[in-house]
Amino acid sequence: MISSQTISQRLTEALNPVSLTVEDVSHTHASHNPQAAAGNTHFTVTIVAPVFAGKSLVERHRMVYAALGELMPKIHALALTAKSPEEI
């Protein structure tokens, strides 16, 4: 089972963000995904990290996916906002 805390820990260790918000929004998808009612399937992540400076959106997402590693196949949906500090 994946938790918001596990995702936060992975992203913090790998990307050293200055700001990170991870929210489990699985309950909002229970009507079309019965598994979501139990939680831990749908997440919203907003991350601001210096390592994103000069990187494209695709590169940033790949960095997040790499940091999450083997957790990614277990996540049904990940809404991701990734910015550098200069962009906020």
Image (cartoon, grey):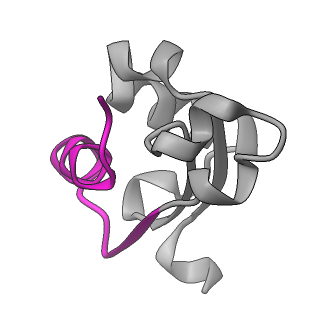
Q: Is residue 15 left or right of residue 45?
A: left
Q: Quadrant of the N terminus?
A: top left
Which of 48/74 is in front? 74
**Looking at the picture, how far across and down is residue 80, in whole percent?**
64, 52
Q: Is residue 75 left or right of residue 49?
A: right
Q: Residue at x 59, y 50 (%)?
A: 26
Q: Residue furthest right?
A: 32
Q: Residue at x 40, y 53 (%)?
A: 51
Q: Is residue 45 above or below residue 31?
A: below
Q: Is residue 79 above or below residue 63?
A: below
Q: Is residue 45 above or below residue 78?
A: below
Which of 67/41 is in front? 41
**Looking at the picture, how far across and down is residue 28, in whole percent?**
70, 59
**Looking at the picture, how far across and down is residue 18, in whole percent?**
31, 75
**Start and end of the magenta stretch?**
1-23
Q: Within the magenta stretch, is there residue 8?
A: yes
Q: Residue at x 64, y 79 (%)?
A: 87
Q: Quadrant of the C terminus?
A: bottom right
